[in-house]
Amino acid sequence: MTKGLRISGVSQHFAEGSNRITALDQVSITVEPGEFVAVVGPSGSGKSTFLSIAGALLKASEGDVQLNGQNMSKLSARELSNIRLQEIGFIMQSSNLVPYLNVLDQLLIVKKMSGKVKGEDKAFAFKLLEELGLGSKLKSFPEELSGGEKQRTAIARALINNPNVILADEPTASLDTKRAHEVVSLIAHEVKSRRKAAIMVTHDERMLEYCDKVYRMEDGKLSLHTANEEAHEAQLTDGIV
Amino acid sequence: MFLAMKELMHSKMRFLMIVIIFVLIAWLVFILSGLGNGLSTLAASTFKNMKADYVVFEQGSQSSMSKSLLSEHLVAEAERLQNVRAASPMGSTMATALKGQSTKNEDKVDIAIIGINPGSFLEPAIVEGKGLSSGHPTDVIANVTMKDDGFRLGDTFQLDGSTESLTIIGFVENQTYNHVAVVFTPMAEWRKITFAAPGSDKGVADPVNAIMLQGKDIDPSTINSKLSSTDTVTRAAAVQGMPGYKEENGSIMMMLAFLLAISAFVLGVFFYVITMQKTSQFGIMKAIGASSGFLSKAIISQVFVLSLTSIVVGILLTYGTAAIMPKGMPFKLDTGLVVNYSVILLIIAVLSSLVSVRKIMKIDPLKALGRVE
């Protein structure tokens, strides 16, 4: 069984009036466990469509998406929902926490979605939150948290089901530089130590230093821009964003 | 349930407002149903509490006591018919009881005089004093509410516009007819009072208004064919045939029906608006893997908890209201009625939330992410 996320030859078309818009054009990418990949590109380039397909929210018009060797294009809506729950951890742009749940319950509700919350789940939730520096905020509601804390809660929520894939959609959009670094380095740390396949869609060139590979999306086409150690220099020279 | 309860605890104010509205609706439903029940009891409790299954009326009397006149000799015939366990005659007349020679308003009391055969199955159980006897035709038993009008055991009262005077020898409970207290007299005395005017009995020998039958398996058409010019109906139909009963009950039932329909819409709209406000929240939860079923369960359990709380509070308020209502108010709650309407309200609330559930089913997690390109 191939671990990680494998997307091959995926295209997505939308009908807009009488025109056919191609949002994604033959996109292929492979993300191995423990690999942290960034996708950059101007708005309207198809980044979100790409993430939606990778995240089992949208079915591609053409091509294959394989998650842990399982082909997602053949699954029903219910099965896709289950894949999202078990195999994919989402970190969204403005954390999108449930307003009436405290930090601990934000994690436990994900467990509730797939059944009962066991003692070990609670222990794991405590451990995750402790790791992400939220040990003292367990009973706080989202309105009492800072932007960084909210985003860290969202990271913990993405990890609670121990998924194989982490998808981050502009996780630093509403954060200042210091907190943005804090959040992305935490994502990178979790991805490495827990061996997740992670994709981050971002506008924020400051964050690319944490990624193993940087892909660029333009007019629905995805191309490898920089890899590994070059990533760091990439943000110094311009070219990206 | 987890999600539902957490949200209830977090947005207490918002849900409190819904509960208040629901409590008011439930309160009104219970009071109206209690009032309807009270009125119909007042109108017909004698009929309703009677241990009879079928009633034989004169043909063409529209199941109404006041329009029917039969001869008592039919009783013996009826008793011999198939499936009839027992038969007994009955007569009714409206009258006014006069306390002494007084002309004061409060000393004139409307009563219904019901003539029965002493010792028959139509004679209700005595709560005080003793029962009727054929030997003393002017000894009567009266509904206990006459005590509130100042009548005591052993009192003798006159009937307005009649030379007859009656003595109360016993009291019975829950016996009202046409909204007034019932006085039971032996058949002979009832005839004396009712047919005082010559010719008012239309020449019928030993006239009675109706014959009550006992027997679960009676076939009304057989009775009609065996007893000439009669019309046999169930006791329930006889209650419906009482003058004004259908109209009175009908208007209360109509109000209740409207109230329930309105409450379904009001609650449905409330739940829908609340769900609409949470569309993006639900979308996000769907995006991270919540199934529609999971979210629907949260909504329904929330509505269930809110409804149950409101109904319980509504019931308590209703019993509280009943306790401070003036004594003469025709208000009667019984457990069966309260349980019935509670269940109806609960079902209406849950059904009205189904519109919201449908909304949840249709939420697209993609839109919730807010970045569809």
Image: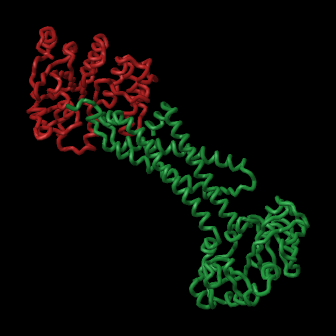
* Residue drawn at (63%, 86%) of the image: B230
Pick the front one: A92 or A21: A21
Q: Is residue B5 above or below residue B260?
A: above
Q: Can you give x and y, in whole percent of width and height, for residue A115 in the image?
A: 38, 40
Can see residue A4?
A: no
Quadrant (top left, top right, bottom left, bottom right) of the N terminus of chain B: top left
* Residue drawn at (34%, 27%) of the image: A96
Quadrant (top left, top right, bottom left, bottom right) of the C terminus of chain B: top left
Q: Is residue A96 left or right of residue B206?
A: left
* Residue drawn at (47%, 43%) of the image: B303
Q: Can you give x and y, in whole percent of width and height, for residue A148 in the image?
A: 34, 17
Q: Is residue B27 left or right of residue A133?
A: right
Pick the front one: B31 or A115: B31
Q: Residue furthest top?
A: A236
Q: Is residue B61 above or below residue A142?
A: below
* Residue drawn at (12%, 22%) of the image: A216
Q: Is residue B138 left or right of residue A106?
A: right
Q: Which chain is red?
A: A
Q: Which chain is green?
A: B
Can see residue B48?
A: yes
Q: Can you give x and y, in whole percent of width and height, for residue B183 in the image?
A: 79, 70
Q: Residue furthest front?
A: B103
